[in-house]
Every structure is written in C-alpha cells, then in structure tokens.
Image: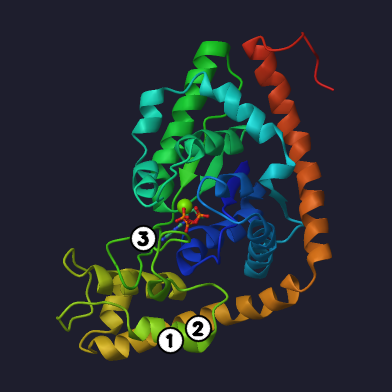
Amino acid sequence: MRIFSGIQPTGRKHLGNYIGALVQWVAGQDRGDALYCLVDLHALTVPYEPDALRDAVYDTAATLLAAGLDPDRCILFRQSDVHEHTELTWLLSSVTAYGELTRMTQFKDKSGSQGELVSAGLFFYPELMAADVLVYRAHEVPVGEDQRQHIELMRNVAQRFNTRFGETLVVPEGRIPEVGARIMDLQFPERKMSTTGGSPQGTVYVTEEPDAIVKKFRSAVTDSGREVVRAPDKPGISNLIDILAAVRGSSPEEVEASFNGSGYGAFKQAVADAVVDYLRPVRERYQELRADEAELERILAAGADKARAIASETIVDVRQAMGVGPVRARQ
Ligand code: ATP
Ligand code: MG
C-alpha cells in the first residue's frame, strides 16, 4: 500500500495542519510505503518572496521531522526536485475538464483575497496536486477535510485517463480523520485555520511559545452561553471541543461529559494547557533540527532520489499510453 501527501512550505504550519494531516502522516509510516512532499511549487500560486520560500522549505521540513517523520521509514522530499510532477501535470490536463477546475471552492476562496494578481497557477493548483499523487500511483492520501474536493478531482482524472488510454494509473482514496479534520480559526470560527488566509491571533503555530498559545486560547471567540457542548450556533466552542478531543485522543462526547458544568473560562484554560503539553516536545525537537540546514538538505536530496525512481516509471508508462515520444521501454 502506498501513501502520498503534501504540505505547503508557506509560513509557519499550524495546529490544524498538525491534527488534520501530520498525525496521520506519522501513523502512515507504519501502515505502508509513505511519501511526503514539501510542495514548494504549490506555494508559488500566491504572492511570496523567493528567499523566504527557500527558508520555509527548511522550516517545514524540520517541523515534519520534529512531528515524528523518520527518513528511514518514509520518503520526505521537495516537490520541485522531482520534475516528473510538472510533466505529469501537463499530460493530465488533456483529461481534465475546464469546468471541473472552475468548480473548485479552494480557488474561489483564495482568489477572492489575492489583491491585484490572481495567478493562473492558483487555478491550476488541483491539476498539480492530482499529478503529485498519481505520479506515485498512491492508494491513499491523508488530508484534512478541505481537500475532499481536490481528491475527488484526482480520482476523476485517473479514471478518465484509464478509460481513454488504458489501465495505467491508480485511483487513490482520501483519508480524512474522524476528529480534527477541520480545525477552525480561533478568532473567526466559521473559517478554517489557515497558513496564508487566517488571522494571526486565531492561528496556533506548531512551534509557538507556550505563553503565546495560552493567550490565543484564552481570547478565543466563543458565544454568550455557558455549556461546553457542540452545536451549529456554537462554532467557537465546538472547535475547542474538537481540538481537545484530538489532542487527548478521545471523542468529542467524552470531552463534553468531562466539562459538564465547568463554564467557558476553565474549559479554555484546559484546552490551552493540553495543547501546550502536546506541542512542547515538537517545538523542542524543531529547534535542534532546524539549526542544521545541511542535514535537512541532505535528507531532502536523498528523498528526492528515491521519489524520482518511482515517478519516472509512471511517466514512461503515461507517455507510452498517450503516444507521446518514441516507443521506449522502461529503463
Ligand atoms: P493554505 O490555507 O494556504 O492553503 P493550509 O493551512 O491549508 O494553507 P496546506 O499546506 O495547504 O496548509 O495543507 C496541509 C495539510 O493540512 C492538508 O492536508 C490540509 O487538508 C490540512 N489542513 C489545512 N488546514 C487545516 C485545518 N484547519 N484543519 C485540519 N486540517 C487542515
Ligand atoms: Mg491548504
């Protein structure tokens, strides 16, 4: 069983990324052959600074290793090091409907907040993401809830490719956690916590200092009620319940039961303390790992070599099936 997932090396990664994706990534190392990718080419779809991007790749790599990825048990690499992703993106575009891309809600959400330039790359993002996964013929893609639509698109693309050109690609399944698949911004609990689109006060960073984390939870937006229960008109409290459940590894019902009659103040403090304890070891390991850029680069380069070996075989088969290039056997 092959697992693939990607994360954008943009800014500091947050608690939503950690709970929604990284926890599953770490577990995936024991369930199959796992490939995890720092998708720097996806990060070019919104405004960015070239020097900051280079550094952010190392920040994110160190965060992933600190979270428990082990380069001996998974393939960790940088997307732009494996050119097969971009080649497959173009090849797959011939079996992708323009209308499908126009329906993607991530594009609609992000294009609204881009200022003067909405890049064509932002529109084409789901095609590159389809190629990321399909080039490894991955079976499973651990992601947060927000990626459900992009997974559906890549499944359609793979199926359409196989129907048109013959069985070549694996149709992957998304793997979305039951609790914590959509962590919301603490200040705007109707919006997901986000690396690029969130509020600074409502976003809890994986490597953030304990004092700052506590402050953010204490000032989290809730409602005027008192009961620690989930409800559609209580998005703030519902989000905090989900966060605590995910961190404790319990269910939201158990969290509700254990705070029956406590009031919001005590509950927020408990969530803050639990998250601080949860992230403390990750932050400490991060600081050690981030200090050695040469070692991070060595890990990524070794990962890219392994990834390329798999991806290049798929590209040979796809080109062959599509009639692109001379008849050529796999090397
Ligand atoms: P951006 O908002 O700029 O797209 P992001 O915060 O979504 O950034 P990504 O690198 O795009 O970060 O996502 C990495 C993984 O984290 C994906 O699997 C995504 O589904 C998951 N994820 C992102 N935000 C959340 C969230 N708020 N709750 C749970 N999972 C999330
Ligand atoms: Mg995202």
Mark 3: secondary structure: loop
Q: Is any part of residue 73 visible from this angle?
A: yes
Residue found 46% across the figure and 23% down from its top = 96
Q: Amino acid at mark 3?
A: Lys
Relative to 253, 33 lies left or right? right
Dot 2 crowding, Cα within 10 Å, few <14, some 14–19, many 20+: many
Identity of the residue drawn at 80% across and 20% down: 330
Which label number is shown at residue 192? 3
Whether pointer 2 and pointer 1 mark residues with C-beta atoms closer than 8 Å, the reply is yes
- Element under disc 2: helix
Check contact, mark 1 vs mark 3: CB within 8 A: no
Whether residue 321 is situated above or below residue 158 in the rendered picture: above
Q: Is residue 223 left or right of residue 240?
A: left
Extreme residue toward the front, this view: 116
Q: Residues within 10 Å of mark 1 (few under 14, many from 20)?
A: many
Is the distance from the Cβ of mark 3 to the nearest ligand 1 atom less than 8 Å? Answer: yes
Report, in whole angstroms, how far the alpha carbon at label 2 lies from the one at label 1: 8 Å
Residue 276: mark: 2
Residue shown at the point (47%, 69%) measured from the top left: 15
Residue beneath the point at 74% across and 43% down? 81
Q: Image quadrant for the N terminus?
A: top right
Numbered label attached to residue 214:
1
Coordinates of residue 66 in the picture (x, y in percent): 66, 70
Q: Earlier in the sequence, mark 1 or mark 3?
A: 3
Which is in the foreground here, disc 2 or disc 1? 1
- The percent coordinates of residue 90 (x first, y second) are 59, 25
* Residue contact between numbered discs 2 and 3, judged by CB atoms under 8 Å: no
